[in-house]
Amino acid sequence: MPLPIKIRDQYFDWEDTPYLMGILNVTPDSFSDGGEAETIDKALAKADKLLQAGAKILDIGGESTRPFAEPVPEEIELKKVLPVVKALREAFPKAILSIDTYKSKVAEETLKAGADIINDISGGQFDPKILDVAKDFNCPIVIMHIQGTPQTMQINPQYQDVIKEIKTYFSERLNILSQKGISLDKVILDPGLGFGKNFTHNLSILKGLKEFQEFDRPILLGPSRKSFIGEILKKPVSERDAGTAGVAIFAYLQGVHFLRVHNVAMVQDTLKTFKYLFKELEG
């Protein structure tokens, strides 16, 4: 079991997992919620809704990383996210804010403005300077696995053994972070559902989630509205929240520590009900 993490004034001791990370995209082209929070007023309203529903972390992103999405220039991403981070910090002083970026400058400026966590889909590969930023701010950092880039990752991804290869990646990245002087008790691992994985790969990751516990680091999972849920349900993105809640129950049983989701209220209520029944009727 990983050691507890204290972020801002909140203490994550893994006794009530999974903690929910609410998705707050401030970009018009995200794969399922584009435009919902692209102004400061919309972002504040959505953030309040997510926090009221039980989100422990708000994950702010200014660049869509859906399959085949085009990169956003640094200055445009900063223009999108920086005012929102500042406004969120002022409106919700105790909220934990995560910046979803792989760009070191975006991470640095938003951390200065009040963000608490770096959530990097590339694990520091796309812009290695982001690791220096994490060290300088002594902040938690999410290291996600990705095969390729958002522009290429879903073009026939291949693995000999997806769990083994992700574990090798985590081991290599943790060594690099350690050499950088980053305290590993600040690292959260994300196997990257849907990022360079096909349907079978995603199911293999879910089946093998407990294997990532060998790193003794918290595990974050981002299943929300992903295509593998669509394949199971045969439903479009807009109708995958119930499926996401189903994955959340499975992730809870596998010991996942954080879940990054769009519909926090549904997932929170689903988990609360399941955990109550499991404890009272099965425990």
Image (cartoon, rainbow, N blue to C red):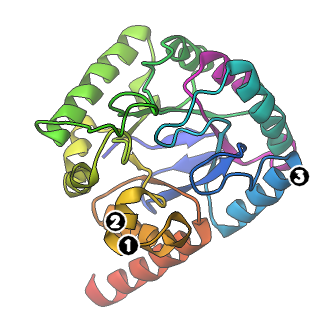
When the figure is inspected, residue 196 is found, relative to residue 25, above or below; the finding is above
Q: Between residue 189 and residue 215, name the one nearer to us.
A: 189
In the picture, the disc for residue 161 is none
Q: Is residue 236 left or right of residue 145?
A: right
Residue extent of the magenta highlight = 90-111
Who comes first in sequence, dot 1 or dot 3? 3
Return the x and y of residue 77 as percentages of the image width and height.
71, 28
In the picture of the structure, the residue carrying the numbered disc 1 is 234
Q: CA distance from mark 2 to mark 1?
A: 5 Å
When the figure is inspected, residue 211 is found, relative to residue 246, above or below; the finding is above
Return the x and y of residue 237 as percentages of the image width and height.
51, 64
Q: Is residue 19 left or right of residue 153?
A: right
In the picture, the disc for residue 41 is 3
Q: CA distance from mark 1 to mark 3?
A: 35 Å
Closer mark to the observer between disc 2 and disc 3: 2
In the picture of the structure, the residue carrying the numbered disc 2 is 231
